[in-house]
Image (cartoon, grey):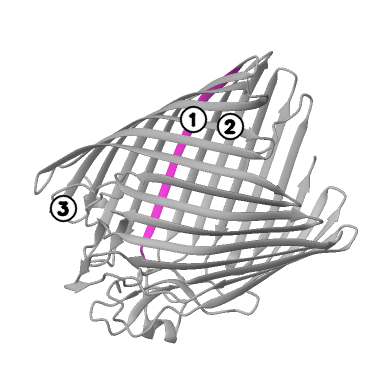
């Protein structure tokens, strides 16, 4: 969660970046913003074009975003907008034999996807003493299409989505028992409508073999209180209640109309205490939920499932300690998650399903240390276990089996060295442990996805307001993939090979 600093009156910012590198990458971004005492404006433009690691893997994206803002004593109003346009080649998954022969080949050499859209938000805030009231009214549209000429004799899908949202909220500050506290309350309203058509090719989209219309509404009320029980102890209480209604219809064949409505609640209780000597401890428990959206419920080859997906829910608990003193930072925690109806894409069904109950628990460690003014060191470790609590897949009881696609270990390390006044060397390492292949819920496949380690380097030098950087990703040219799936016979696998070593050179200018 990155919150940028609000511009001061009379401030001007400008930034420009040009970047070239491996796999035909060309990138440009630029931004300009100006704030006067009353009015402000900003504009950001970025464009990226890369051929990609694999054939038919070209990626092109252009983004434009901007804002207008007016400030008055105790109040402000703003208009924000953004446009995006993207085109992506889809090289498809490769079999084990194809990866061994040439990991850069494409199994779908002509498949492409396109996406474009925009959003606009009109909002404002008003301060009354120590209290603040604000609201946003937003609209977003999205148009996505994908074309697979080599898939089942041709498959094309075209989706349009629109959403209106209104989010009023208020923050109240008050004193009690000699300390300051605050409470945030708000409402969230959004309305979605979707339309998707599927045909054998773009030329046939006017007479599709499937046309689906969707509608969803969400109404929620929430609140969060930050209460100081003492000068060293803070209690956080949060709650949310949301009502969601869905409708999804099929207008071609077979005709279908599925509807559902759910009201769910979420809550959080957190306690943080400063122990002393740089040490702090915290504990929290919470309940969360996620409603399925139109894409989750999508069915490209009717007839579809008889019912829409159920909401995903989870109960979580976490206990941790933190230490920060003399340039050293440490955070360690343990957690437990119990999920029900997790929304998961099933290769067996060819659609999203509600997964059987699962449980996940783990340990996380994050550290940082500055042994000298010019050196920053950091490291992290995450140990995870994900197991089915119950369920049957393919006629096999999976109770106690490992959930696929969850690595049991993740580790990171990094170092930053200012070896000269305006020069910095950054090094990063990331390790991902072994994990079960997708489609192996029964854990019967004799192999797991291989673990891998990636190393990145970046050298930066600054000349006043101009910065020059040379970056190398995947320094040792590790051949790996982060997603793999077993075949239905359970004898081999397919995967999406990830990029090898690549270098990038960038030149940046910053006014501020």
Q: Residue at x 47, y 35 (%)?
A: 238
Secondary structure under tag 2 reads strand
Q: Which mark is residue 83?
A: none
Q: Which residue is mark 1?
A: 120
Circle nearer the N terminus (2, 1): 1
Q: 29 or 357, which is in the foreground?
A: 357
Residue range (magenta) = 110-126
Residue contact at pointers 2 and 3, CB within 8 angstroms: no
Residue contact at pointers 2 and 1, CB within 8 angstroms: no
Viewport quadrant of the N terminus: top right
Q: Which residue is mark 3?
A: 305
> Residue 163 colored magenta?
no
Does residue 348 appear left or right of residue 17 in this picture?
A: left
Residue 4 position within the rendered picture, expressed as x and y whole percent measured from the top left: 67, 38
Q: Is residue 199 above or below residue 102?
A: above
Write down the quadrant of residue 8 in the picture: top right
Q: Which residue is mark 2?
A: 227
Give the class, few, some or many, for how many residues have Cα within 10 Å of label 2's Cα (few <14, many ≥20). Answer: many
Secondary structure under tag 1 reads strand
């Amino acid at each position: 969660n990155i919150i940028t600093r609000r511009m001061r009156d009379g401030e001007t910012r400008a930034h420009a970046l040009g970047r070239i590198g491996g796999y035909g990458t060309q990138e440009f971004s630029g931004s300009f913003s100006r704030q006067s005492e009353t009015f402000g404006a900003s504009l950001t433009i970025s464009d990226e074009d890369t051929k990609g690691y694999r054939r038919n893997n070209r990626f092109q994206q252009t983004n434009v975003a901007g804002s207008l803002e007016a400030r008055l004593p105790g109040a402000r109003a703003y208009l924000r907008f953004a446009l995006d346009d993207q085109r992506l080649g889809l090289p498809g998954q490769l079999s084990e034999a194809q990866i061994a022969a040439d990991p850069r080949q494409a199994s779908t050499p002509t498949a492409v996807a396109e996406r474009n859209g925009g959003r606009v938000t009109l909002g404002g805030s008003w301060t009354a003493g120590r209290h603040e009231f604000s609201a946003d009214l937003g609209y977003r549209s999205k148009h996505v299409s994908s074309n697979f000429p080599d898939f089942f004799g041709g498959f094309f899908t075209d989706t349009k989505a629109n959403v209106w949202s209104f989010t009023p909220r208020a923050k109240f500050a008050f004193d009690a028992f000699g300390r300051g506290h605050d409470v945030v309350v708000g409402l969230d309203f959004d309305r979605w409508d979707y339309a998707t058509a599927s045909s054998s090719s773009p030329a046939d989209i006017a007479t599709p073999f499937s046309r689906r219309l969707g509608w969803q509404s969400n109404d929620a009320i929430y609140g969060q209180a930050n209460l100081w029980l003492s000068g060293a102890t803070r209690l956080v209480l949060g709650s949310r209640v949301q009502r969601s209604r869905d409708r999804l219809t099929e207008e071609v064949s077979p005709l279908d109309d599925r509807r559902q409505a759910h009201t769910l609640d979420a809550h959080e209780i957190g306690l943080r205490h400063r122990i002393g000597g740089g040490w702090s401890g915290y504990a929290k428990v919470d309940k969360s939920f996620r409603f399925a959206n139109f894409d989750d419920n999508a069915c490209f080859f009717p007839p579809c499932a008889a019912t829409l997906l159920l909401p995903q829910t989870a109960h979580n608990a976490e206990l941790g300690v933190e230490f920060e003193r003399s340039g050293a930072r440490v955070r360690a925690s343990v957690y437990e998650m119990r999920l029900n109806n997790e929304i998961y894409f099933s290769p067996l069904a060819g659609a999203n399903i509600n997964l059987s109950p699962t449980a996940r628990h783990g340990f996380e460690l994050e550290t940082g240390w500055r042994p000298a003014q010019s050196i920053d060191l950091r490291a992290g470790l995450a140990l995870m276990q994900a197991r089915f609590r119950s369920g049957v897949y393919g006629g096999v009881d999976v109770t106690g089996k490992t959930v696929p696609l969850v690595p049991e270990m993740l580790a990171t390390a990094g170092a930053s060295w200012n070896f000269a006044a305006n020069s910095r060397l950054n090094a990063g390492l990331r390790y991902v442990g072994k994990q079960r292949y997708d489609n192996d819920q029964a854990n019967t496949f004799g192999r797991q996805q291989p673990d891998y380690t990636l190393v990145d380097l970046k050298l930066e030098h600054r000349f006043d307001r101009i910065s020059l950087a040379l970056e190398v990703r995947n320094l040792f040219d590790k051949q790996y993939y982060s997603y793999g799936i077993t075949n239905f016979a359970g004898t081999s696998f397919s995967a999406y090979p990830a990029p090898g070593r690549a270098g990038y050179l960038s030149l940046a200018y910053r006014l501020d």
